[in-house]
Image (cartoon, rainbow, N blue to C red):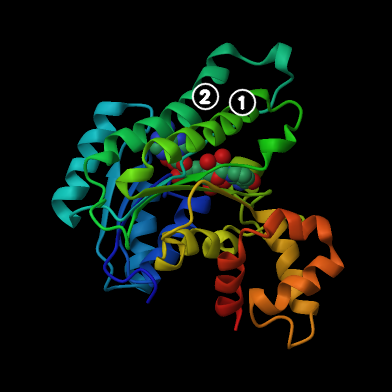
Amino acid sequence: MLLKGKNIIITGAGRGIGRAISIACAKEGANLGLISRTLEEISETKDIIQSQASSSKVVIKVADVTKYDDLSKAFKEFYDELGQFNGVVANAGYSRMWATHEFINEKFSEILDINVLGVFYTFKAAYGFMKKDDKKDKARFLITGSEAYPYAPQRLTAYVASKYAVVGMQKAMATEYKRENITFNMVLPTQVDTRLLRGKNAGDGNKPDHVLNPTELNDYYLFLLSDDANKVDDTLIFTYDIQDIKKLLHDAPVDKNDSWDNFKDYLKEKSSELYEKVKNLGKLIDFIISREK
Ligand SMILES: NC(=O)c1ccc[n+]([C@@H]2O[C@H](COP(=O)([O-])OP(=O)(O)OC[C@H]3O[C@@H](n4cnc5c(N)ncnc54)[C@H](OP(=O)(O)O)[C@@H]3O)[C@@H](O)[C@H]2O)c1
């Protein structure tokens, strides 16, 4: 089991990507502290975990990532029940779509509050409880970013601003905490079949083909939380690049798709552009190869 006995905190775990990651971490042996604002949804996440990974300890708290005192109290309770945190995933997020000149002022602020201030509060509230005493087993702080960085789709100005902001925050924090055995990494998903993208239609079985299921992101988070990523820091994992890598691995001859070392020249030949984008992610690609075997 990849995460046996590790304590992982995940915000936005009531549905969508956060729920999928929570279930995946529990199946890999992690104990979990889970947050969202909706008791019914977060309880359902816990029930699913307990039916699929009963040995995992799961503590749920209703808290709003934009309310520092509530978050701080929830994290103290996670610490009391689980012990120090090995990983924290700042995943809670929100978006709305309007032409910029028509964007409702309060909604613009709300998006920034959840997606930017919420990440800052999550780190600040978690910091004192993170396990940072072991160079060989560093604490992990993960952020769910978005392909809105760097693509900046129109009518999503507030969301784009927020997802650009967290890339800068990650860079600043990775430098600032380098000596403290905390790493900072980000998964930047393409479109995923969740309420954020598809509203009430999420999970209805009619998603367009290019839209990923939330579970298709699990391996990126598992890798970043695992021992394999102990030295991975300030990395951006763009899921659309890795989805392309998966297709190429699938089509590659067997002697080329069994390790990054054997695959990289084949990749360079097929797409030098993609090779340039992922050449520092060899450990992740090895991880994905091992998971798909
Ligand atoms: N879906 C996509 O296409 C896509 C693409 C790229 C990136 N992302 C990112 O993925 C992350 C997860 O989104 P998702 O797609 O899984 O959306 P989702 O299904 O709407 O889930 C969002 C989760 O965040 C929680 N949340 C929202 N605001 C919160 C707050 N103020 N405090 C605490 N929890 C809060 C929600 O629960 P409550 O509302 O009950 O609190 C819910 O559990 C976000 O950061 C999003 O930007 C999504």
N-terminal-most mark, 1 or 2 = 2
Residue placed under numbered mark 2 in the picture: 112
* Disc nearest the viewer among 1 and 2: 1
**Residue placed farthest to the bottom in the image?**
254
Residue 115 vs residue 53: left or right?
right
Asked if residue 200 can be seen in this view, the reply is: no
Q: Residue at x 38, y 56 (%)?
A: 44
Q: Is residue 232 above or below residue 74?
A: below
Q: Which disc, if any, is residue 161? A: 1
Quadrant location of the C terminus? bottom right
Near-viewer residue (209 or 142): 142
Q: Position of residue 46 (x, y in %)?
A: 33, 59
Q: Quadrant of residue 257?
A: bottom right
Could you tell me the amino acid type at mark 1?
A: Ala
Q: Residue at x 50, y 22 (%)?
A: 110
Q: Is residue 245 left or right of residue 104?
A: right
**Secondary structure type for disc 1:** helix
Q: CA distance from mark 1 to mark 2?
A: 8 Å
Q: Residue furthest left?
A: 80
Which residue does the image show at 60% across and 63% down from the upper left?
216
Looking at the image, the residue that sits furthest to the right is 270
The residue carrying pointer 2 sits among few (fewer than 14), some (14 to 19) or many (20 or more) residues within 10 Å by Cα, namely many
Q: In the picture shown, does residue 211 fall above or below 218?
A: above
